[in-house]
Structure formats: structure tokens, C-alpha cells
Image (tube, coloured by chain):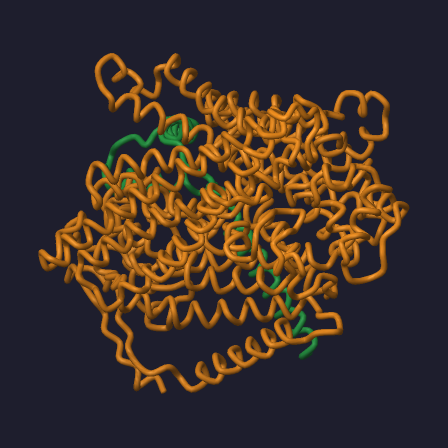
């Protein structure tokens, strides 16, 4: 009985760790940026059209084109 | 226990939950015990690293000594700086909140921002410098990496980040102009540009040295370009926004490219196509830098950046775990005879100042101030998070540097010098190299030519003799560590090329982004001159973009080519210039910080930025002085220049390591360029520092001067102060989550 709960507990912990790693990598690389942008538009300009995800990334990259960020050694 | 902690929520709007919480109180007993234990473990580890002689030290002690020092410094010194100097206020909106556009200004989770900031500051620098510095033994390098970071580098990063966060995320150049006036600002801007050029050139030289005559390495690195293009197209047209998905695909392809490199290097056509001479590689790199600078970001730069970020975090964790599991023993002496005599073959000069020049990134890196201002502050949620991000990320980079040092000191010392001494000394073949290193008086049994050949074969390379630049040595040490944990000697060649690949990947990311940034600096400066040149301000004007890219690439390409063909060994002569340049940038950043502290009349705490500034100036100015004025040809650029000129005037056909009249001319030309660059760097920085001193004196006389800090804006968001949220902060976060749900609920109904 206790063995089973311990197993369930460790599976649970493992799943949690997996979700945390997934959340971290996706946030770091920018998977959620568009969703954030949509939420931002809804909050700041209710009713405005945030545009598609494709358009968002085009604009982001155009921005980066015009304002490059340095990388260190 | 908890009753003794005083908790005070701070509200900026009665209708909202608190935006910050102030918690005061003595440290709980359990914490005190914990920090005492950490301090004791650290002290024990340091004494083992520093004092144990005659028997071999285990590398794990380096890890303990470093990590315990970081924990104590982070908990106590960075908090001290925060309380006395930075005085962050979390009820004040950061630029990210005030100018939030969900693009470049955007409040970003502190843990995610830590990753971004770390990926931007850490590259190949902390991996290469410590490897070269290992010629002086393990002790001086380890102490400088850890202490220099804790008292210097991390302080600089943290303070510049805090400064910029209160100034709309302005860049270092802009802040220098604002705080030091126009003259000082222009000098700072020119210095930043010139320093950037030399940084790109030397990093490119490291890549060239790692890949020259290595078909395996060249193939794997060449493959990163089509992989990046594929990722770019995938994200643009097929599945926009699926960044982690495409990155996982990209990393898988990257690993495949490393494995495939081994197969390709076995074939005759592979050897024919991908065995490139250093000069050919230098031209390819220059062409690549130009293309990256003018091509759209989405096609090449952005996807490479994703790959590089992913690989950076992944490999560093891998290496740390590898060292802890493999627990290798150290082969190098604590302090080598070269440190005392200053005649080492890897780089010339005495311990002071040249060790502190060689290890810049990882201890004190001025380049970080360009990231800590401009990019990161625009993403900061709360002012107090500048501490975990600015100070914390630099501690992490310092740890990377310690690991790099470990990989260099655990390999056989004879092999280390065979790999790192310039070809002029080793003669380039296993036999001559064995003779050379056996004559150096190193500890341990002498090496045979066969052993050097075996070492090369083991990692799938033609030769390891005089593979200078640090990257091959790091890869070699890393392969030794990782293959002892995973895969045994069968995987040694894979790990070697894996390490070469990620170092080259980091460096290429710096080269392409750096070329682009330098191009923009140039076009901005040209545009600011006015008149018909005003058109350069328009970044979409293609002619201007192409022109400025060509200028930038020609500048660093010329230095790269000079290094590649240098008869004296490019790394040997150029790496000091790289370190000096990087730390002179730190002098500029620390001057700006010190000026602001004086202007705000925080005189009692001015030593916090002033001590690293004075130390940095002592190091860089002594090094510059010796490089310019030393009468010893090995150290002084101009002394070398004169020695070769005299030899030429005397009608000699060969001199020293230069065996032909052309090689002699090359030395005469190169030393003149290097000497001139040394003078330019030092003079520009002295101007900036002098202007800083004048402003400080003026400020003290006037009883303080206004700074360009932005006026207060009340914050309307909440985030924890540090990396880990306290119970009180979790409670407030729950109130905000509740509010968010309520808002979403009413939004759905209306």
C-alpha cells in the first residue's frame, strides 16, 4: 500500500519536474510570446485586432532587424 | 519564528492587491546554520585547493570552493550592495512595465529573464581565457575567476543593469553621454566600437584555429548554416511561433551533423572539400559575417540564437554533471614556473597583469555592460530582480569559467603545452613538439611523439600540435571528462567534436550579432554627422547597410587575417589585446557607475564600484604600458617591431621564428598595427576616466548633481523580489491570481 503511494508520489514528482522543464524551455525560447501579446492587446486596447501569430513574428523580426542586440563573448 | 519577521505590504492603488512587500527581520536560525555550514565547506575546499601539495588535488574541490563562495557572496555581498547602493523600490514601475509593448519592452518572468541574460552574456570567452591562463597553474586563475567575479564582474553587471533600469533601459553609450557629457560620451562610443571590432576578430581567430585542417569540425559547423536556414523558413512560413519545436528539431540535426562529420572526414571527397587552411577559413568567416549582417534576422540570426541558447544551457549542465561524476584529478601545478618568470609559451608576460588580462570573461568582462544596459533592463519585472539577474547570472558565468579551467588542468601537462604553444615553438610535428615540451621542465614523465599522435587519433583529428586558441584544449579536456562518464573511449571523438561544435556555435553567434551591432553603431554615427550622411540613419536603406557591413567586416577581417598569418602565432600576440580591450570596456562601465554614485552623494559606499574600477585600471594600464613600452620583444609590440626592423636593415633574411623576408615584413606590419591599437584603446579609456573624474570633482564641489534617472511611476503589477518567492509573496501572488480569474470571468460574461 505504502509502496504504491510512494510510487504514485514519485511519478507525480517526475511529471511535475517534466512540466517545469517544459515550461522553462518553451518560455525561454518564446513559444508563449504571441499569447502574451494577444493578452496585452486585449488589456490595453480592448476590441482591437491583435493580428495573426504569423504577423506578430514578422513584426518582431522586423523590429530585431532594425534594433540588433549584442551577444557577448 | 515567523512572528519576529516584520511584513509590510505596499499598495499603489487601493483597489489592487499589494504590488510589493517589505519583509524585515533577523535571519531564521536554520538559515544561519545553513550558511555557516556552506562557509565552512567553502573554507575547507579553498584550503585544499590552495595548500595541498605533493599529491594530486581532485577537481571536485574547485567546484565546492567556487560554489560555496558564490552562495555566500550572493546572500551577503550582493544584498549589502542592494541595501546601500541600489536601494530598489518595487512599488516603482520598471521600464518593462511602463513601456510594455509585448515586444522589446515586456515584464518577463525572472527565471526566464535569467536564462535570456545568461545566454546573452556567456559565450566562448569564459571557456577560452581560463584554458590559456592554465599555463600559470591552477591556483592564480581559480582565485581570480572567483574573487574577481564576486567583487568586480558581478558588481559591474548588477550596477549597470540597475542604472539602465532606472533610465528607460538606455544603452551604456547613451548613459555615458548623459552622465559624462558630450565629449566623454563620444570617446566612450568610439571606444566601444573599436573594442567590439577586436573582440570579433579574436573570437573569429579562435574558431579558425579550432577548425583549420579539421574536415570533421568544418563539416559539422558548415551544416549549422543550412540547419539555421531550415529553422528560419519553418518558423516564418510553416509553423510560426513554434520555437521550441523547431529548436528540438534543430538540435537533433546538429547532433546528426556532428556524427556525420566523422563519416565525412573518413571519405576522400570529404577530406578534399572540408580540409581548409587557416587563411581560407578566415575568408569564409568574413563572408559569413557579411551575409549575416545584411540578411534578414529571421532567416539566419534568430534561429542560430535559439540553437545557441539551447546548447549553451544544455552543455554547461552536462559539463558540470560530468565533472562531479568523473571527479578527475588535477595534473597542472598550483603555480607554474611560467607564472613566476613570465616566459610562458601560450602568452607572454608576468602573472600581474597578464593573468588578469587573459581571463576577462568569467571574472570581469566589460562586454556584459552592453547587455546589462539596453536589452535586459527592458524586460525586468521589478527593480530588485536586478540582483538575481545581474549579479546571479555573472556568478553562473564565473562557474563556467572555473569548469573550463578544470578541463585544462586535468589533461597531461606535456600535452597541454604541445597543443597550446605556437607552431614556431613546437615545430608543428609530434616529434619536434615532444622534444620541445620535454625541454620545458614540466612535472611528470616526459611525453613521446607516439603519445601525442595517439591523443590526436583518439579524438579523430589529424594532429593536436599547436592547436592554439583554447577551444581544442577545452574540447580535449571535456572529451576526457565526458567519455569517462558516458561512452568510454569509443565516444571520445564524438565528445571532442561536440565541444568544438558548441564553442564554434557560440562564437559564430557573437561574430554575426557583433558585426550587425557594429554596423548599426557605424551607420548611426555617420548619420549623426549630418548633411548628406544623414541618410545612414535609415536602417532600411540597403546601400548604407551594405556599405557599413563591408567596413565592419573589413576591419575585423583584416585583424583576423593578420592573426592567422602571424609568424609569432596569432593567439599569442592578439589574445592580450582582446583581454585588454574587454577590460577597458569594464573601466568605462565602472566609471559611469561611479560617477552616478558620486552624483547621488553616496560617498560612503563609492568604494563598491571604485575598488574594481581602480583594480581594473591598474591591470589594464600596466598591461597596456608593457605592451607599448616594454623593451622586451616578447612582451612589447614596439620592441618586437624594432627588433625585426633592425634585423631587416642589417640585411638578414630570417629572424627568430620568421624564416623568410616576407614573414619578417609580416611581423613588422603586425606589431605596428597591434601597438597602434593598444595606444588607441588606452588613450580613449583614459579620456573617459579623466572626464569621469572631472565630473565627480564638479559634483562634490556642487554638493551633488542631478542624474538622468527617470521620475517615479507607481507600479501596478506584482512579482517576487528574488529568485524564490517567500511565503508572504506567495500569498500576495494568490490575491493577484484571484483578481486575474475574476477579471477573466467578467470579461467572458460581458
Colour assigned to chain B in the rendering is orange
Residue furthest out toward the front: B650
Locate residue B342: give its quadrant: bottom right
Residue B72: x and y in percent read: 46, 72
In the rendered view, does B490 fall on the left or right side of B245? right
Colour assigned to chain A in the rendering is green
Q: Is residue B530 above or below residue B50?
A: above
How many numbered markers are drawn?
0
Residue B429: x and y in percent read: 83, 38
Q: Is residue B114 above or below residue B38?
A: above
Residue B238: x and y in percent read: 54, 26
In the rendered view, does B269 fall on the left or right side of B370? right
What residue is at 21 percent from the left and 67 percent from the top? B10
What residue is at 51 percent from the left and 63 percent from the top? B146
Is residue B615 at all visible to an observer of this figure?
Answer: yes
Taking depth in this image into account, of B335 and B230 the one nearest to the observer is B335
Taking depth in this image into account, of B254 and B60 the one nearest to the observer is B60
Q: Is residue B373 above or below residue B408?
A: above
Is the N terminus of chain B in the top left, top right, bottom left or bottom right quadrant?
bottom left
Is the C terminus of chain B in the top left, top right, bottom left or bottom right quadrant?
top left
Is residue B245 at all visible to an observer of this figure?
Answer: no
In the rendered view, does B450 fall on the left or right side of B227? right
Residue furthest out toward the right: B450
What residue is at 49 percent from the left and 47 percent from the top? B626
Q: Is residue A9 above or below residue B465?
A: below
Residue furthest out toward the left: B702
Residue B219: x and y in percent read: 72, 29
Locate residue B501: give its quadrant: top right
Amino acid at each position: 500500500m505504502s509502496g504504491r503511494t510512494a510510487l504514485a508520489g514519485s511519478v507525480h514528482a517526475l511529471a511535475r519536474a517534466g512540466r517545469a522543464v517544459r515550461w522553462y524551455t518553451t518560455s525561454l525560447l518564446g513559444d508563449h510570446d504571441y499569447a502574451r501579446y494577444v493578452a496585452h492587446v486585449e488589456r490595453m486596447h480592448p476590441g482591437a485586432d491583435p493580428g495573426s501569430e504569423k504577423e506578430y513574428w514578422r513584426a518582431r523580426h522586423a523590429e530585431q532587424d532594425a534594433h540588433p542586440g549584442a551577444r557577448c563573448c | 519564528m515567523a512572528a519576529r519577521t516584520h511584513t509590510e505590504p505596499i499598495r499603489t492603488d487601493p483597489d489592487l492587491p499589494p504590488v510589493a512587500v517589505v519583509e524585515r527581520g533577523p535571519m531564521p536560525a536554520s538559515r544561519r546554520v545553513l550558511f555557516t555550514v556552506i562557509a565552512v565547506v567553502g573554507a575547507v575546499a579553498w584550503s585544499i585547493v590552495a595548500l595541498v601539495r605533493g599529491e594530486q588535488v581532485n577537481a571536485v574541490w574547485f567546484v565546492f570552493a567556487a560554489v560555496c563562495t558564490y552562495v555566500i557572496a550572493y546572500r551577503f555581498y550582493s544584498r549589502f550592495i542592494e541595501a546601500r547602493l541600489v536601494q530598489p523600490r518595487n512599488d516603482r514601475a520598471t521600464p518593462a512595465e511602463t513601456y510594455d509593448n509585448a515586444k522589446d519592452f515586456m515584464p518577463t518572468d525572472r527565471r526566464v529573464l535569467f536564462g535570456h541574460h545568461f545566454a546573452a552574456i556567456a559565450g566562448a570567452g569564459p571557456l577560452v581565457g581560463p584554458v590559456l591562463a592554465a599555463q600559470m597553474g591552477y591556483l592564480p586563475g581559480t582565485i581570480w575567476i572567483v574573487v574577481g567575479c564576486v567583487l568586480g564582474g558581478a558588481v559591474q553587471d548588477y550596477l549597470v543593469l540597475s542604472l539602465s533600469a532606472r533610465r528607460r533601459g538606455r544603452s551604456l553609450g547613451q548613459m555615458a553621454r548623459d552622465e559624462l557629457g558630450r565629449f566623454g560620451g563620444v570617446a566612450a562610443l568610439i571606444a566601444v566600437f573599436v573594442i567590439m571590432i577586436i573582440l570579433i576578430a579574436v573570437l573569429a581567430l579562435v574558431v579558425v584555429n579550432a577548425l583549420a585542417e579539421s574536415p570533421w569540425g568544418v563539416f559539422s559547423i558548415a551544416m549549422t548554416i543550412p540547419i539555421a536556414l531550415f529553422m528560419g523558413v519553418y518558423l516564418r512560413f510553416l509553423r510560426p511561433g513554434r520555437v521550441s519545436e523547431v529548436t528540438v528539431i534543430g538540435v537533433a540535426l546538429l547532433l546528426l551533423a556532428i556524427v556525420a562529420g566523422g563519416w565525412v572526414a573518413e571519405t576522400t571527397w570529404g577530406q578534399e572539400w572540408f580540409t581548409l587552411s587557416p587563411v581560407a577559413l578566415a575568408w569564409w568567416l568574413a563572408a559569413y559575417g557579411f551575409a549575416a549582417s545584411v540578411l534578414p534576422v529571421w532567416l539566419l540570426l534568430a534561429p542560430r540564437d535559439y540553437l545557441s541558447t539551447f546548447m549553451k544551457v544544455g552543455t554547461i549542465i552536462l559539463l558540470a554533471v560530468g565533472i562531479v561524476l568523473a571527479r578527475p584529478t588535477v595534473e597542472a601545478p598550483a603555480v607554474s614556473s611560467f607564472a613566476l618568470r613570465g616566459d610562458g609559451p601560450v602568452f607572454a608576460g608576468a602573472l600581474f597583469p597578464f593573468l588578469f588580462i587573459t581571463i576577462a570573461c568569467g571574472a570581469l568582462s566589460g562586454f556584459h555592460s552592453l547587455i546589462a544596459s539596453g536589452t535586459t533592463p527592458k524586460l525586468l519585472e521589478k527593480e530588485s530582480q536586478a540582483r538575481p539577474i545581474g549579479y546571479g547570472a555573472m556568478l553562473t558565468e564565473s562557474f563556467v569559467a572555473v569548469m573550463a579551467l578544470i578541463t585544462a588542468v586535468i589533461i597531461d601537462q606535456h600535452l597541454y603545452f604541445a597543443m597550446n604553444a605556437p607552431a614556431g615553438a613546437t615545430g608543428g610535428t609530434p616529434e619536434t613538439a615532444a622534444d620541445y615540451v620535454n625541454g620545458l621542465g614540466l612535472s611528470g614523465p616526459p611525453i613521446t611523439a607516439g603519445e601525442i599522435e595517439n591523443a590526436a587519433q583518439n579524438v579523430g583529428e589529424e594532429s593536436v600540435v599547436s592547436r592554439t586558441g583554447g577551444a581544442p584544449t577545452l574540447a580535449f579536456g571535456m572529451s576526457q571528462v565526458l567519455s569517462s562518464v558516458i561512452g568510454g573511449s569509443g565516444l571520445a571523438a564524438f565528445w571532442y567534436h561536440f565541444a568544438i561544435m558548441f564553442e564554434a556555435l557560440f562564437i559564430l553567434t557573437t561574430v554575426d550579432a557583433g558585426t550587425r551591432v557594429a554596423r548599426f553603431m557605424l551607420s548611426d554615427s555617420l548619420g549623426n554627422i549630418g548633411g548628406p550622411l544623414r541618410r545612414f540613419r535609415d536602417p532600411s536603406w540597403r546601400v548604407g547597410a551594405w556599405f557599413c557591413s563591408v567596413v565592419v567586416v573589413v576591419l575585423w577581417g583584416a585583424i583576423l587575417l593578420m592573426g592567422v598569418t602571424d609568424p609569432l602565432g596569432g593567439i599569442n600576440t592578439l589574445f592580450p589585446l582582446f583581454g585588454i580591450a574587454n577590460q577597458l570596456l569594464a573601466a568605462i562601465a565602472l566609471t559611469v557607475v561611479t560617477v552616478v554614485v558620486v552624483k547621488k552623494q553616496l560617498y560612503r559606499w563609492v568604494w563598491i564600484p571604485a575598488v574594481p574600477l581602480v583594480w581594473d585600471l591598474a591591470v589594464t594600464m600596466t598591461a597596456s604600458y608593457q605592451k607599448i613600452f616594454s623593451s622586451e620583444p616578447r612582451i612589447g609590440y614596439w620592441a618586437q617591431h624594432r627588433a625585426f626592423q633592425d634585423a631587416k636593415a642589417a640585411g638578414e633574411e630570417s629572424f627568430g621564428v620568421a624564416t623568410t623576408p616576407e614573414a619578417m615584413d609580416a611581423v613588422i606590419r603586425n606589431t605596428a598595427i597591434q601597438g597602434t591599437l593598444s595606444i588607441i584603446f588606452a588613450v580613449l579609456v583614459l579620456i573617459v576616466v579623466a572626464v569621469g573624474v572631472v565630473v565627480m570633482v564638479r559634483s562634490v564641489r556642487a554638493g551633488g548633481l542631478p542624474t538622468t534617472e527617470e521620475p517615479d511611476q507607481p507600479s501596478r503589477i506584482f512579482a517576487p523580489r528574488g529568485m524564490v518567492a517567500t511565503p508572504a509573496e506567495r500569498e500576495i501572488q494568490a490575491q493577484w491570481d484571484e483578481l486575474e480569474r475574476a477579471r477573466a470571468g467578467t470579461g467572458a460574461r460581458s
